[in-house]
Image: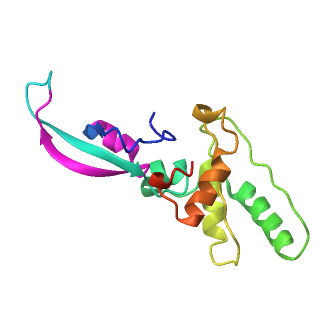
Amino acid sequence: MLFGCKISPRRATSVDAATRRMLAASFELTDLGQQSLKGFDAPVEAWLIEREGKAADRFDAFRASRLTRLVGRDHELGLILERWREARHGHGQVVALSGEAGFGKSRMIRAIRASIAEDDHVHITYQCSPLHTNTPRLPVARQLGLAAGFTDADGYA
């Protein structure tokens, strides 16, 4: 999986059509057209990885364009939105959303964000990766770098 990997501007990395589909919005790509490659009988389509994409998080990058309606979580969504209303009225609240991988945590967050989109608030997302266990502050550094408008060439992460 390439998500979370830093693409070096010194080394060109190209991918095929199948990998391009998996990358979705995680990276900005340039279409190289048909390329004759060693070991292939016919030319294949290739894309050059330019830089990390601007998707807010992995969920946005991989699934946002294919979302369906949230089903079977009305009660949980209602509880969380009630906590939101309490917090907006000055009563501090904390909600911990946890579950196994694939349980729907990211989908629930997406539904919450849609429900409060008209409310005045600041949304910050931090996501960790097992690829970066030795850089625990990386999510914060990335968020600050994006907010400051830094690019990969600036070497912020």
Q: Is residue 23 magenta?
A: yes
Q: Position of residue 155 (x, y in %)?
A: 52, 50
**Residue at the farthest left position:** 42
Residue 48 showing in the rendered view: yes
Residue at 33 percent of width and 43 percent of height: 21
What span is colored magenta in the figure? 18-37
Decide whether residue 81 is among the magenta residues. no
How far across and down, in percent of the image, does residue 136 sit?
A: 70, 40
Please indicate whether residue 51 sits to the left or right of residue 104 in the image: left
Residue 72 visible (yes or no): no
- In this figure, what is the number of numbered marks? 0
Taking the image as shown, residue 43 lies to the left or right of residue 64, namely: left
The one nearer the camera, 119 or 75, is: 119
* Residue at 86% from the left image edge and 70% from the top image edge: 86
Where residue 83 sits, quadrant-wise, is bottom right
Residue 117 x, y percent position in the rendering: 62, 73
Query: In the current view of this chain or complex, which residue is farthest to the top?
Result: 39
> Can you say which quadrant of the picture contains the N terminus?
top left
79 or 22: nearer the eye?
22
Residue sitting at x 46%, y 48%: 62
Q: Is residue 100 left or right of residue 92?
A: left
